[in-house]
Amino acid sequence: MIATIDTLPKNASPKTDRIINLKPYQDGFIFSDARYPALVSGWGTGKTMSGIEKIRLSAENHKGNLLLVVRKEFTDLKDSTIIDWEKYTGVKVSSSRDALFPNGSIVMFRHGEELTGDNLSNMNLGGALIEQAEEYDSDEVFFKLSGRLRRCFGCEKVSIDGVFRCVCKQFLSVIANTRGHNWIYKLWKTGQDRQRFELFEATSFENESNLPLATIEDWRLLEKQKPSIYRRFVLNSWDEDDVTSQCISPD
């Protein structure tokens, strides 16, 4: 079943209003109730769109929510992530790199160096997204952010062992390309906690209907000229990484 969603908030420009038909892997990721959903997929599969949509929906659906979008490098955050956000949502990001919603929700955009030391100490997050998470060499930032997921959305608290506790569903989502058997592979692909670490995968060809024919032809050429790049970024193979000096390949 393919879901259809209206991608724009109420304060967006009508000129950019559009409907997106979601592929099954996109639908699964966006509407996942898992604590840590991940979308690891090939080129052209709508990873960024899916990650942005999950953040936008949470901002709109929960009054006064606070969410965080993270990219490792500032240049990538400014020239790619923020531009994509404004294109997909119609919500402008201020000079302080915050997107404000009419219901009081805020989406913050930050880069890797801003998440070191005590910079996370005052964040009380309802959700977060790490874009291109494979750019990080370790899981340190991921687990630092996981400790900040404690914003309550005003739910009806449940009594557990005589103590009333919040059962709101905060989340820390990840979108990435494969990069060998890295920390993402260990947590989502081979990890044991599948209920909290829910993985969605797709090859580039699973979104072929939304891509230019010339792009598909380029990938076919890439298969012959650069097979390792083709396997990693098109076929979404976990057995390829960007280490060129290895003596024995994972294959």
Image: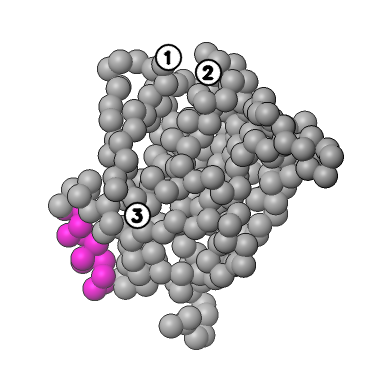
Q: Looking at the picture, which amino acid does disc 2 mark?
A: Phe
- Whether residue 221 appears in magenta in the rendering, the answer is yes
State the CA–CA distance, disc 1 to disc 2: 8 Å
Residue mark closest to the camera, 3 vs 2: 2
Residue at the left extreme, as displayed: 213
Start-end of magenta stretch = 214-225
Q: Quadrant of the C terminus?
A: bottom left
Q: Position of residue 87 (x, y in %)?
A: 37, 28
- In front of the other: 97 or 19: 19
Q: Contact (CB < 8 A) between labels 1 and 2? A: yes
Q: Earlier in the sequence, mark 1 or mark 2?
A: 1
User: Can residue 14 be seen from the camera position used here?
Assistant: yes
Residue placed under numbered mark 3 in the picture: 43
- What residue is disc 1 on? 11
Q: In this picture, is 138 found above or below 228?
A: above
Marks 3 and 2, how far apart in space? 31 Å
Q: Nearer the viewer, residue 47 or 19?
A: 19
Please tell me whether residue 49 belongs to the stretch shown in magenta.
no
Q: What's the residue at 41%, 59% (across, down)?
A: 201
Identify whether 112 is placed above or below 182: above
Judging by the rendered image, the residue that carries numbered circle 2 is 101
Residue displayed at 53% across by 31% down: 58
Q: Nearer the viewer, residue 17 or 153?
A: 153
What amino acid type is highlighted by mark number 3?
Trp
Coordinates of residue 111 in the picture (x, y in percent):
61, 39
